[in-house]
Amino acid sequence: MPSSSSSSPNNYSTKILASILFAILLILCAGAGYGEAQLSPTFYDKDCPNATSIVRAVIEEALQTDLRIAASLTRLFFHDCFVNGCDGSILLDNSSTIDSEKGALPNNNSARGFDVVDNIKTALETACPGIVSCADILAISAEESVSLSGGPSWTVLLGRRDSTTANRTAANEALPAPSFTLDELKASFAAVGLDTTDLVALSGAHTFGRAQCQFFSDRLYAFNSTGSPDPTLNSTYLETLSALCPQSGNGSVLADLDPSTPDGFDADYFSNLQVHYGLLQSDQELFSTSGADTVDIINSYSANQSAFFESFVISMNKMGNISLLTGTDGEIRLNCSKVNEDTYGSSATLIAEY
Ligand code: HEM
Ligand SMILES: *[C@@H]1O[C@H](CO)[C@@H](O)[C@H](O)[C@H]1NC(C)=O
Ligand SMILES: *[C@@H]1O[C@H](CO)[C@@H](O)[C@H](O)[C@H]1NC(C)=O
Ligand SMILES: *[C@@H]1O[C@H](CO)[C@@H](O)[C@H](O)[C@H]1NC(C)=O
Ligand SMILES: *[C@@H]1O[C@H](CO)[C@@H](O)[C@H](O)[C@H]1NC(C)=O
Ligand SMILES: *[C@@H]1O[C@H](CO)[C@@H](O)[C@H](O)[C@H]1NC(C)=O
Ligand SMILES: *[C@@H]1O[C@H](CO)[C@@H](O)[C@H](O)[C@H]1NC(C)=O
Ligand SMILES: *[C@@H]1O[C@H](CO)[C@@H](O)[C@H](O)[C@H]1NC(C)=O
Ligand SMILES: *[C@@H]1O[C@H](CO)[C@@H](O)[C@H](O)[C@H]1NC(C)=O
Ligand SMILES: *[C@@H]1O[C@H](CO)[C@@H](O)[C@H](O)[C@H]1NC(C)=O
Ligand SMILES: *[C@@H]1O[C@H](CO)[C@@H](O)[C@H](O)[C@H]1NC(C)=O
């Protein structure tokens, strides 16, 4: 008994010492960049070294049956980043706590590729459970989709964490509409810290993928309440599109955003704009708004694909850096469509946070 009474204070101070050392260790880790809002190209090198090739393999598989999927995944990243940052919020389904962004006007019956994101997540959870965030899956998927389609490849900065919230109202407000004028487009990009060059370069993503008739048919029949077609639409293209999208026809029919190379990632988007073949009003506005500072940028990308690719990569990195959750903020979702608490209950949420 006497010995235990003398050893117990010793044990106690040992524990205090250990706690202090542990706290110092945590502070050192934070100082080494762990807690700072900075991404890193080597973020998963230790715990999930094959993350990128796993993502690529699933996308390659999906491309076998759906050439459009590369475009769809690239768009998901954009629609994630513009709404409260790149935090995977667009992937969350409705639940008692989630008002899904999938129901927002720009996403409803339009955003696609969620099944492929789920397949990627499943493959990553098998290889390295609880490591790779859904937000980073979208970032890697966008890069792999672009490069697999003939576009540039680049080093993706990683370390984003996933939100535990979504906001459908915010998605409706933050995402630009296809009927936007140039000033409205600039304002929408400026609101997330992106400039005019970013707007032009990132709009170049409309070099692949599809758009439904409902998003541009006003240009064919009753543009801007004039009762006539959009005067900036090439008359040959107007005929083609009118045949595809008859007035009061099926608004879900799909048109290629880039009619010359529908699934290839190249600079054709910009040469299309020069001959008034921009599909969406928001596309043609960039070239046809008189006196606009975007025209020179379009001409330079059209003349030099490398210049476009270089700008696109810079702007994708900027977009991928909008309002991030890093360090111990948010969580690493175990299922991209649900916050961890909805998947496993509140105790699993605590475990998954570390
Ligand atoms: C500048 C403002 C933008 C507007 C107004 C806009 C609007 C749209 C619209 C209306 C569609 C067609 C959706 C549908 O029919 O279901 C679309 C498709 C697409 N958008 Fe954008 N977008 C913009 C910028 C961007 C950016 C910045 C990116 C990526 C960096 C992007 C990537 C795509 C892709 C790849 C598709 C085709 C998706 C598919 O085929 O599934 N867009 N966009
Ligand atoms: C990464 O993938 C390669 C081949 O694709 C495989 O040989 C290697 O074992 C994988 N490494 C890990 C850590 O899974
Ligand atoms: C989510 O629920 C809201 C109503 O609470 C509904 O309007 C919306 O369509 C739902 N979204 C999805 C994607 O199911
Ligand atoms: C999404 O579209 C469906 C029709 O497919 C509609 O029933 C639903 O109300 C829409 N959701 C929202 C939030 O508008
Ligand atoms: C959702 O976004 C809207 C618009 O940005 C904002 O007014 C609202 O406060 C947000 N809701 C939540 C719960 O954060
Ligand atoms: C639409 O019409 C208004 C008023 O007639 C005009 O000021 C505006 O520039 C037009 N918008 C476009 C995109 O042509
Ligand atoms: C409208 O077009 C879409 C896409 O081509 C098709 O899936 C859908 O069945 C069509 N709806 C009607 C009512 O014809
Ligand atoms: C319309 O498109 C054709 C190619 O289909 C092109 O030769 C012509 O210059 C374009 N017209 C305008 C006004 O851009
Ligand atoms: C095309 O753009 C690249 C990248 O900006 C640049 O290095 C190259 O000199 C440009 N080529 C021409 C012919 O201007
Ligand atoms: C990302 O944002 C952080 C701070 O918000 C900044 O320090 C960093 O330079 C940015 N990185 C890129 C690639 O824009
Ligand atoms: C993720 O959650 C969704 C929605 O509850 C479910 O349908 C899906 O099977 C889950 N995915 C995995 C891999 O568990």
Image: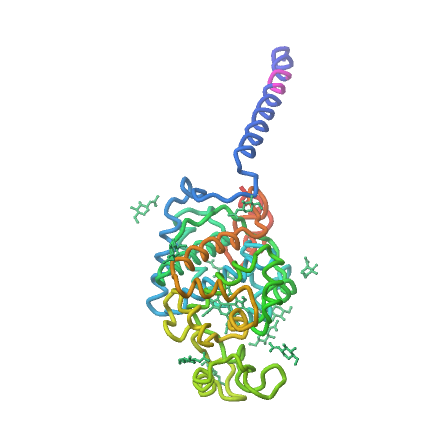
* Picture residue at 36% right of the left edge, 67% below the top: 264
* Picture residue at 45% right of the left edge, 60% below the top: 117
Residue 226 falls left or right of residue 156 = right
Q: Position of residue 256 (x, y in %)?
A: 42, 75
Q: Residue furthest top?
A: 2
* Picture residue at 44% right of the left edge, 76% below the top: 275
Q: Position of residue 161 (x, y in %)?
A: 54, 49
Colouring method of the image: rainbow
> Which residues make up the magenta segment?
9-13
Q: Nearer the viewer, residue 26 or 170?
A: 170
| Up/down of 131 relative to 1, above or below | below
Q: Nearer the viewer, residue 267 or 33?
A: 267
Q: Nearer the viewer, residue 184 or 110?
A: 184
* Picture residue at 60% right of the left edge, 26% below the top: 19
Q: Position of residue 208 (x, y in %)?
A: 42, 68
Q: Quadrant of ligand 8?
A: bottom left
The N terminus - image quarter = top right
